Image: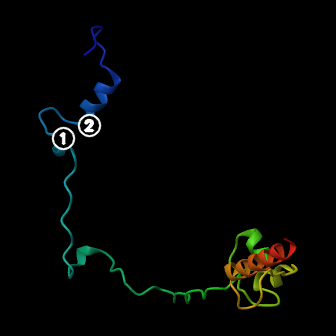
Amino acid sequence: MDPKGEDDPGESSSKAAQAPGTTPSAAYRPLRPAPVAGSAAAGPQISSVPERPLRPPRQPVPAACLQCRRRKVKCTGTRPTCFRCANQGLDCHWDTEPDTTRVESLRRRNEELERENDDLH
C-alpha cells in the first residue's frame, strides 16, 4: 500500500485476480471432465469424414512459366500455354525445355558458358 493510502495499479490487479487466502492455482475455474463417448451430453458428433471430397494433391511441375514465377503463383506447367496465362490472356514464355527442371536447365546453361569461356582463353 502506498503511504498516501492509494494502491499501486500493479498491486491491485494481482489482488483482484487472486482471492485472499487462496493459492494461485485455486483462483482458476476448474475444468469439466471429458464427456463419455456414448453420452448425449457430448454435443454434436464430429465426423471424421469431410463434408466435401478433398482435391487430389497437385502433381509436381518440372518448371513454371516466367509469368507464374514473376507473380509467385502455382503454374500448371502445361505447354505451350499454362492455365493461368490462358485464362488471363497473357503470353506464356518458358526459359526451360519441356520435361526439364529449372535446376537442370541452369546447370546445362552454366556448362555451356564455361565451355565458351574456355574456348576464348
Question: Which residue is denoted by mark 2 in the rendering?
Answer: 17
Q: Residue at x 82, y 85 (%)?
A: 86
- Residue type indicated by callout 2: Ala
- Place of residue 51 in the rendered image (x, y in percent of width and height, measured from the top left): 47, 86
Q: Tag on residue 117?
A: none
Question: Which residue is denoted by mark 1 in the rendering?
Answer: 24
- Residue type indicated by callout 1: Pro
Image quarter where the C terminus lies is bottom right
The local crowd at label 1, few if under 14, some if 14 to 19, many if 20 or more residues have their Cα within 10 Å, is few
- Place of residue 37 in the rendered image (x, y in percent of width and height, measured from the top left): 21, 80
Instruction: State left or right for residue 68 relative to residue 28.
Output: right
Picture quadrant where residue 45 is located? bottom left
Task: Pick whichever, 17 or 78, lies toward us.
Answer: 78
Q: Is residue 27 above or below residue 5?
A: below
Task: Pick whichever, 30 or 64, lies toward us.
Answer: 64
Q: Residue at x 32, y 20 (%)?
A: 8
Image quarter where the N terminus lies is top left
- Place of residue 105 in the rendered image (x, y in percent of width and height, measured from the top left): 73, 81
Instruction: State left or right for residue 39 relative to residue 13.
Output: left
Q: Is residue 99 above or below residue 117?
A: below
